[in-house]
Image: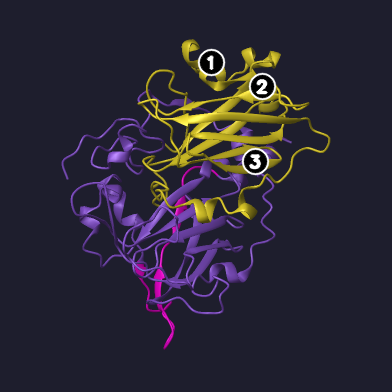
Amino acid sequence: MSAHAVTPSQTVGPFFHDCLLRVDRCESTGGDEGGVQIDLEGRVIDGDGAAVPDAVIEVWQSASFARIGTGADGGFSFSTTRPKPVELDRGTMQAPHLSIAVFARGLMNHLFTRIYFEDEPSTERDPILHLVPEARRATLIAKRAPDQGLTPRYRFDIVLQGPGETVFFDFRSTAR
Amino acid sequence: MITTIGEIVRGDAAVFPPYLYEAYRSTLRRAPGLPLIEVPLTASALTRARLDVSRVSAEDADLTRNAGTGGEALGQRIIVTGRVMDENGLPVPGALLEVWQANAAGRYIHKRDDWAGPLDPNFLGIGRCLTSAAGGYRFLTVRPGAYPWGNHVNAWRPAHIHFSVLAPSWSQRLVTQMYFPDDPLLGLDPILNAVPEGARSRLVAAYAHDVTEPHWALGWRWDIVLAGPGATAFEAREESAA
């Protein structure tokens, strides 16, 4: 049992934009010096396959944080630095990935997921991906998209519910 | 409230609401239907990201005056203050708190909020601050009004303030809502009632006369307790491994 009573989550509701997506708050804080820039694009869709036009996505990696809202078609896009491999525990490496949180009206708690990269050879050996049933792993892997210039471009859709549902994570807590 | 309640919960099911809570209609097509995959807390989930929050200023925490008009917001002036801590009661310093709320009439400045409550030109309903070394925070604002919404017939949201907590640890990320104890709408609200009964009162602020300032503003106290270990736990682990 924990000493202090944990505060429950609540939905962001529909009216978060003016606060959470103010321009000076959602821009990336940069990345590793000399890192390779990549572009990502995708859509957030619900259990009917309909666009989720009022979601916000947070992207977290070691050196940067960014927030992106979805548009009327559920679409989002952002640029970041290509992530590097990170340690899981001493001696065990994780494949390069981006940590993602998804917030929306109707989501009582945000959803945690990850974006891996199909053209990264270490992805198939990633220890976290191996905790995911094989049939669902593809939902966590961004596909190369046609480049629109010199920057590598990837596609990653977030399916909240239903066929092709994205894998979402919970952190194993020692307190439970 | 009789409703279908889903089994998928992230975090402690005695604390956190299920993703599917039928009485809140927007959960029906947005709640995941497949079990969450449990993963260990990795270094990347505990490591501090370098947040560029140097632009947070003291005036950001004064919602009564931060609209930039030179005027003051209408409504009951209130102080909302408290501490952000972890499960062990240790303070969480340097967390970015962002708040948004309706004005005293229950109206948001949001372009999609189209109900007939009047806008207040001197109120944006947006604020932010960084927690102090002791995990403390303090906002000056006006008490938000209740407002109707389309969830069911004659549905009204109780007065609330949205809080986003960006702690140094990714695993501790929290977005929630703070309510007021003297609100008759609390028992009728499916969003609050989606929280397990034993944990609901944790979202309700307490009137604090010691926070109330004479001839100025009423005081409310509300502490926020983040689940799980924080960045300090990771740093301790690294040090012991070194």
Marks 3 and 2, how far apart at CA: 17 Å
Q: The N terminus of chain A is located in which quarter?
A: top left
Q: What color was chain A assigned in the picture?
A: yellow
Identify which residue, B93 or A158, lies in the foreground.
A158
* Element carrying mark 2: loop
Where does label 2 land, which residue?
Answer: A95
Where does label 1 land, which residue?
Answer: A138
Q: Which chain is purple?
A: B
Question: Circles 3 and 2: CB distance less than 8 Å?
Answer: no
* Element carrying mark 1: helix
Q: As shown in the figure, which amino acid type bears the numbered disc 1?
A: Ala
- From the viewer's perspective, is residue B238 above or below residue B157? above
Q: As shown in the figure, which amino acid type bears the numbered disc 2?
A: Ala
Quadrant assignment, res A51: top left
Query: Does the rendering let one see residue B91?
Result: no
The 10 Å Cα crowd at callout 1, few under 14, some 14 to 19, many 20 or more, is: some
Q: What percent of the width, then of the height, locates residue B41?
A: 55, 33
Tell me, yes or no, whether dots 1 and 2 are on the same chain.
yes
Viewer-nearest of labels 1 and 2? 1
Q: Is residue B212 magenta?
A: yes
Identify which residue, B15 or B214, lies in the foreground.
B214
Q: Main secondary structure of the magenta part?
A: loop
Q: Residue drawn 64% across and 43% down?
A: A65
Q: Which residues are magenta?
A: B206-229
Marks 1 and 2, how far apart at CA: 14 Å
Task: Please report, as a chain letter, where disc 1 is located.
Answer: A
Q: What percent of the width, then of the height, locates residue B121?
A: 47, 72
Res. B47 mark: 3
Task: Please report, as a chain letter, where disc 2 is located.
Answer: A
Q: Is residue B219 magenta?
A: yes
Viewer-nearest of labels 3 and 2? 2
Marks 3 and 1, how far apart at CA: 27 Å
